[in-house]
Image: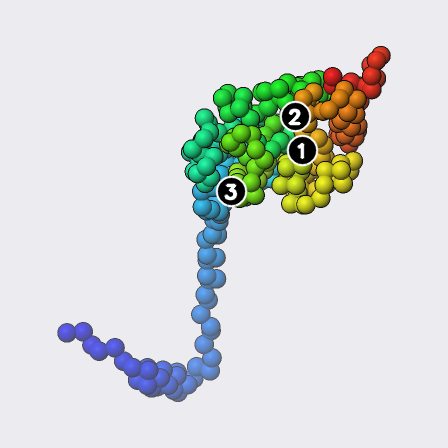
Amino acid sequence: MPDPVPGPEELEHQARAHLESLRTAGVEWIPAPHTAPLPAPPAVQVGPLPARVTAPSLFAGVTDAAEASGGEPDIAQGLEQRRQALELLAEQVSTCSRCPALMSTRTQTVFGQGSPGAELCFLGEAPGADEDAQGLPFVGAAGQLLNRILAACGLKREEVYIMNILRCRPPGNRTPQPDEAANCREYLEKQIELVGPKFICAMGLCAAQNLLGTAQSLARLRGRFHDYHGIQVLCTYHPAYLLPHRSPDKKQELERKKAVWEDMKLLLARMGRQIPPRSAGGDGGAPS
């Protein structure tokens, strides 16, 4: 059986006895023992911190791309992710049932047309019969006039993004009701955020008032730029308002078209684009 380990008092007594025996033997000092320095602890290798974990969202791909690159995402990659996110949002919109009256009468939803990253977005109020049938915005008579307006501005339809306040056709092409616009507001805001335009042209009173959250008349909203979350907004007449059957006479029709052309020249100047030269028989490239 091993001897028991002595306690602190016993060890102290033994040390004092040993020192006393050394003193009796004539030993006046003893050298301190040499102790090597303790080795330094190994360096801790700190790896990269784990990526921030967030809940899945519509914009996760865009955010992750920016974080992975340490800042700005690759432009092409970011646009592709935004395009995919727009497709997912369009699928969500296609089954929307927030407005039972619109859901029961629509042929299909009309999401929007164009590419993410477009500098300019045109915003109308709601799809019409032709749009409801084809699933594309501004393809009827007003859409044909919009195409001529774009051409007069030196723009191509594929260069811009086109959408509406509503994504369903109101029965009889009536003006969207406040609750319908409110139900579609989330889609509108997400769509604009994913497209990321620098400029928005709000066409018509309904589009202008709903986007900007104002009750001002179109006459007061026209002729100056407004702000929507850092995006510059210009308001003008809806192309449908310029169609011949909406004007009592040819003079009034021309006056309305001239007013829209003045708005477009203001927009082009702010965008830094060249304003097309005046034509021989009219005011610049004003649409006819």
Classed neighbour count for the residue bearing mark 3: other residues with Cα under 10 Å, few (<14), some (14–19), many (≥20):
some
> Is disc 1 in contact with disc 2, using a CB cutoff of under 8 Å?
yes
Classed neighbour count for the residue bearing mark 1: other residues with Cα under 10 Å, few (<14), some (14–19), many (≥20):
some
Q: Nearer the viewer, residue 224 or 75?
A: 224
Image quarter hosting the N terminus: bottom left
Residue 198 placed where, x, y %? Answer: 68, 34
Per the rendering, the mark at residue 240 is: 2
Find numbered disc 1 in the image and state the secondary structure of the residue it sits on.
loop
Q: Amino acid at mark 2?
A: Ala
Residue 83 placed where, x, y %? Answer: 53, 29
Left/right placement of residue 219 relative to residue 138 reads: right
Residue 33 placed where, x, y %? Answer: 44, 70
Q: Nearer the viewer, residue 267 or 133?
A: 133
Q: Quadrant of residue 100?
A: top left
Q: Which residue is mark 1?
A: 204
- Mark before the other along the chain sequence, 1 or 3: 3
Q: Which residue is mark 3?
A: 183
Q: Amino acid at mark 3?
A: Asn
